[in-house]
Each structure stands twice: as structure tokens, then as C-alpha cells.
Amino acid sequence: MPSPTPLPRPTNEQIAALPPYEALPLSRIQVLSQPEQLAAAEQALRAAVHVGFDTESKPVFAAGAPQTGPHVVQFATVDQAFIVQLATPGLEAFLAAVIESDEIVKVGFGLSSDRPLLQRRLGLRLGQSIDLSHSVRRLGYQQAVGLKTAVAIVLGRRLPKSRKVTTSNWASPTLSPQQLQYAANDAHASLLIHRALQGPAL
């Protein structure tokens, strides 16, 4: 039998016509720094089992310049997101407990590129995880699909991806509200896509 014709990816115009993604409000996005915050966040992530996951790195504009990221790691449950700035002291045990865990399943896009960065920057192995770019591709698309396109395909929503925020300074000591929202969206949308692909059981 001939192979089925790959599905066409939605165009930019089609994505722009979709309703906006229903993002977490800033009140549900927490930047972790205090021991009590870390304990509560780890408890919430362990209870969720499947959590949205992503990283952000300060962009490198000079050819051949080394990548020093990631500078931010973000996790999300259905109703909250946790932002971790790697320059903040005292987070090592929390990061190891969550990132290397095989009980907390990290779901996200492009995880193959995150693995070596986490190993180099933090010395951590990415534990149990699911790369959703391949999961969405298996719906019938010829190539791996990124987050923005996957949100359109699976959730029927338009996820804003500001280039200004994408290329902003993620190593800044204080992240802007726009950066916090962007980082949370990446992890939160990944989790919602995973849940939608798994069906009503989740």
C-alpha cells in the first residue's frame, strides 16, 4: 500500500486566525528562590506526574561564540508554572530532584537539544521525558513540529511567540513580566498538548 500523504502544516495565516491561547495569569507563575517555595513546587510536580518542561538561554549573536545556557528552566502543572533562574544560589538539590527524576515525567519540545545543555551546565541527566515534537509528527505530519504549530494543530489556538522576547536576555537577574509569561507558556502549552494527545484519561 502507498504511504499516506503527509498532512499539511497550518500556514501562518491560518494560525493567526485562531483564537488566542489561554495562558496562565502572572499570579500563577512563580519564580522560585526560597526553600519553602522549592519544597511546595517539588510536591506539586510530583503530584502532577506529567509536567510541562522547557529551558531558555541567552542568545548568542556572534558566530562561533559558546552557548552558556540554559539560564532559565521552567516547569508547569495544569494550573501553575515554576520559573527557575539558574544563577540563583541554593537550587541545586531541587533541580536534581526534578530533572533527573523518572517519576516526574517531563514533556516538552526539542528535548534532544536540552539534554546536552543540562548536562554541561548543571551536570544533570534528563530523567523520564517525552519529546512532543515526535508525538505530534506521528499524527501524520512529514516533519517534527514545534510548539507554536503544535498548539494550533492540537489545541486549535494561537500561541504568541514574540521574537523580541525570544531573543531577550534570559540571563538577566530580573526577568520581565513578558519573559515570565513566555517561559510559562512554553511549559504550560506543552503539558496541555500532551494531555490532549493522551485523550480523556488524563
Image: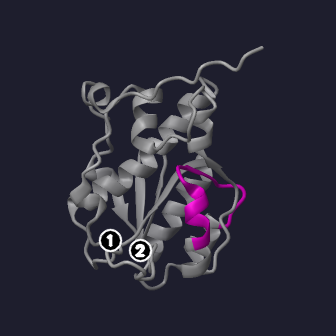
Q: Quadrant of residue 176?
A: bottom left
Q: Earlier in the sequence, mark 1 or mark 2?
A: 2
Boundaries of the magenta span: 100-116
Badge 2 crowding class, 10 Å Cα cut-off, few under 14, some 14 to 19, many 20 or more, is some
> Which residue is at 29% across, 48% downward?
161
Task: Give amino acid for label 1.
Answer: Trp
Q: Residue furthest top?
A: 1
Residue that badge 2 annotates: 71
Q: Residue 125 appears at what percent x and percent y?
A: 68, 70
Q: Quadrant of residue 83?
A: bottom left
127 left or right of 190?
right
Q: Residue 90 appears at what percent x and percent y?
A: 48, 84
Give the CA distance from mark 1 to mark 2: 6 Å
196 left or right of 170?
right
Q: Residue 157 appears at what percent x and percent y?
A: 35, 29
| Colour scheme employed for the rendering of this structure | one colour
> Which residue is at 55% across, 72% downward?
117
Establish if 198 lies above or below 186.
above
Task: Give amino acid for label 2.
Answer: His
Q: Residue 108 appears at what percent x and percent y?
A: 54, 50
Q: Is residue 7 visible?
A: yes
Residue that badge 1 annotates: 170
| Badge 1 vs badge 2, beta-carbon distance below 8 Å | yes
> Which residue is at 26% across, 67% downward?
168
